[in-house]
Amino acid sequence: MHLLWILLGFYYVQFISSQVYNVRDFNATGDGKTDDTSAIRAALAAADNSNGGRVIFDCGLTFLTGAINVTSNVILDLCGTILASNVSDIFHYPLVPPLPWYGGGADFSESGSPERQSVIRSYNATNITLTGGGVVDGQGYPWWACSWSASALEKPPCNNISR
Ligand SMILES: *[C@@H]1O[C@H](CO)[C@@H](O)[C@H](O)[C@H]1NC(C)=O
Ligand SMILES: *[C@@H]1O[C@H](CO)[C@@H](O)[C@H](O)[C@H]1NC(C)=O
Ligand SMILES: *[C@@H]1O[C@H](CO)[C@@H](O)[C@H](O)[C@H]1NC(C)=O
Ligand SMILES: *[C@@H]1O[C@H](CO)[C@@H](O)[C@H](O)[C@H]1NC(C)=O
Ligand SMILES: *[C@@H]1O[C@H](CO)[C@@H](O)[C@H](O)[C@H]1NC(C)=O
């Protein structure tokens, strides 16, 4: 019981000491249909610019988005759903260096070709919290289909980019 209060106290202190960025304040709709990519990136950029904070995705809403970067000292407070866009262009999924432990070898500056950015990505960052009990739906089906046949590989979203 004491431990619980200590934990709650810590949580409370952490909450009030953080700035809060609700993605809806950056004009994300959360309707599951509108592309909220730019709004969500703007909210995360605002958090990054003030060295972190709590970025809120409200309960009961679905936020359709392309890839996002989560930077240091960000609490990604996801109660609703992040639905990965299946629009596979460079705006939604930029090419980034492969993570050192993924694909391109230990030193991507010398080996490894660019990869499409994952839906939620962090690089060279610390103190990130993912909380809120929500859902990240990667809509993987069209991407997995790329590897099921050569003819699927030729079509969007694969566009002959093999992994
Ligand atoms: C949100 O949309 C309103 C109305 O179009 C606009 O005035 C406001 O600047 C937008 N806010 C952001 C953060 O883009
Ligand atoms: C995410 O950060 C990487 C650098 O680590 C950058 O290359 C990429 O364009 C960024 N993606 C977005 C969506 O801002
Ligand atoms: C971690 O990030 C949270 C949220 O921004 C912040 O309140 C806390 O002070 C950070 N902790 C450290 C050790 O920087
Ligand atoms: C792509 O995503 C939309 C939601 O934005 C969904 O309605 C559609 O069924 C998806 N298409 C495929 C091929 O998964
Ligand atoms: C990692 O972040 C630190 C401090 O923010 C910066 O000085 C350094 O250049 C970054 N390293 C890479 C490989 O991005």
Image: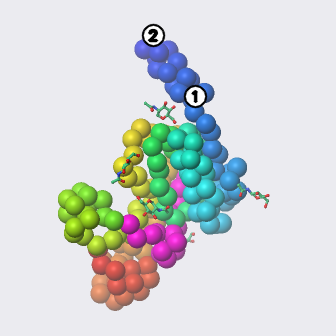
Q: Residue 44: tell me if it is visible.
A: yes
| Residue 31 placement, left or right of 47 | right
Establish whether ligand 3 lies closer than 8 Å to the Cβ of label 1: yes
The amino acid beneath tag 1 is Ser
Q: How crowded is mark 2: few (under 14 residues within 10 Å), some or many (20 or more)?
A: few
Segment colored magenta? 80-96
Q: Quadrant of the C terminus?
A: bottom left
Task: Tell me which numbered mark, 2 or 1, is placed earlier along the sequence.
Answer: 2
| Residue 96 placement, left or right of 19 | left
Which residue is denoted by mark 1 in the rendering?
17
Q: x, y percentage for residue 60?
A: 63, 48
Which residue is denoted by mark 2 in the rendering?
2
Q: x, y percentage for residue 53?
A: 55, 39
The amino acid beneath tag 2 is His
Q: Is mark 1 on a helix, strand or loop?
A: helix
Q: Which residue is drawn at 66% across and 66% down?
A: 34
Q: Quadrant of the N terminus?
A: top left
Pick whichever, 100 or 49, lies toward us. Answer: 49
Q: x, y percentage for residue 13?
A: 55, 23
| Residue 109 placement, left or right of 130 | left
Q: Which residue is drawn at 40% across and 70% down?
A: 95
Q: Residue 78: tell me if it is visible.
A: no
Give the label, 2 or 1, closer to the camera. 1
Pick whichever, 96 or 68, lies toward us. Answer: 96
